[in-house]
Amino acid sequence: VQSNKLALQSIKDNDGVALYETLQLLLMSEQDSGKSFSKQFGLDPPYFMMRNKLLSNGRIVEQLFFYGDKDGKASFENFLAYYSRSKSWRIFKSEQWIEIRSLQGKPISVFANIPFDHADGEDRDAQAQTALALFLQEQDLEPSIVVHRGHSFHLPSTIAQLPISSKIVLLGSCGSYQHLSKVLNVCPDAQIISSREVGSLSVNDPILRMINEAMRIGKDLDWIRIWRSLQQQMRLSSAQRRFENYVAPHQNLGLLLLKARGKII
C-alpha cells in the first residue's frame, strides 16, 4: 500500500493518493478499533454497534425476508426451531408473518414473513412482505436489523424493500458480498455481514442467535468478540468452511472503503 501511494504521489495522482491513504487507515484500524478511520471520515467505528442505536420506540425491531421455494421453507423452519424451544422467547403467528418476542431481558421483536407455496403462480411471499412492512409502519416500528434469507436470485427483491432505518444488514445468500454498494445506496451507514461464496442456514442461524441473545441481555455488539465465539462454535461443526466465507463488519475492508469513497474523491 505504501509503495503504491508513493508511486501515485510521484505522478501527482491526488485521487489515487487519497485512496491509498484510506487503505492505510483501514489496515491500521485493528490496532485502535477503527478510531482513526472513524475520526477521519466521520463514520462510526466498525468494531462495535451500540445497542441504543438500534432502538425503535423502546425496543429493537428485526425484519427477515424469507422466500417460498424448498430451501427457503427449510430455512424458515430451522430458524423457528430454536425460538420455539427457548423460554426466553415466544412466537406469535398471524396469517402472513410471525413475530418472535423476547419474554426475558430487553424488549426485542423479530418479524419474518411466512414463505408460501407458489404452485398456483401467485407470489404470496411478496404479498406477505408488503403486508408486514405496512404493519410495521402503522405501529411506528422501524427495523434496525434486516436479514435476507433466500437464494441469491431473491436478493434484489429484498434490497428493493430494504428499510432506510437498517443499521445492521445480514445478507445470507451466496455471493452476497458483491452487493454491498446496493445496500449502501439505501442505508449508507449500515454494517453488513455477507458471504463471498455459499450462504448457508448452518451459518446464518448461529450468527442471528448470537446477535439476538447479546441484545436481549442488554449488551452492545462487539464484532471481534462475537466473531471469535462463532469461530469456536463452528470448529465443532461441519459448517466451519462455509463460515470462513462470511465477512464480519469489522473485517470488511471493501465495505469501509465504499463508505469512505464519497469523502475521499
Image (cartoon, helix red, strand yellow):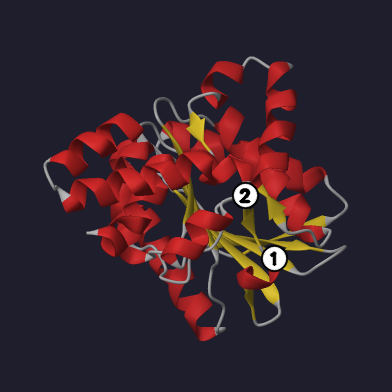
Q: Which amino acid does the dot numbered 1 rest on?
A: Arg
- Residue 168 at what x, y percent from top left? 53, 57
The kind of secondary structure element at disc 1 is: helix
If you read the primary sequence from the N terminus, does the residue marked by circle 1 or circle 2 appear first?
2
Q: Position of residue 255 (x, y in %)?
A: 39, 47
For residue 71, side relative to residue 156 (left or right): right
Query: Crowdedness of circle 2 by 10 Å Cα count: few (<14), some, many (20+)?
Result: some
Q: Is residue 37 left or right of residue 219?
A: left
Query: Looking at the picture, how far across and down is residue 223, in whole percent?
Result: 65, 45
Dot 2 falls on a residue whose secondary structure is loop
Around disc 1, counting alpha carbons within 10 Å, would you say few (fewer than 14), some (14 to 19), or many (20 or more)?
Answer: some
Q: In this orientation, does residue 183 appear?
A: no
Say which residue label 1 marks: 51
Q: Which residue is pictured at 27% across the width and 62% down the height? A: 262
The residue at 73%/41% (across/down) is 225
* CA–CA distance in space, label 1 to label 2: 17 Å
In the depicted structure, whether residue 172 falls above or below residue 92:
above
Task: Tell me the amino acid under the disc marked 2.
Answer: Ser
Q: In which image quadrant can residue 68 be found? A: top left
Q: Residue 133: where, in percent of width, then height? A: 45, 71
Q: Nearer the viewer, residue 64 or 58?
A: 58
Residue corresponding to mark 2 = 33
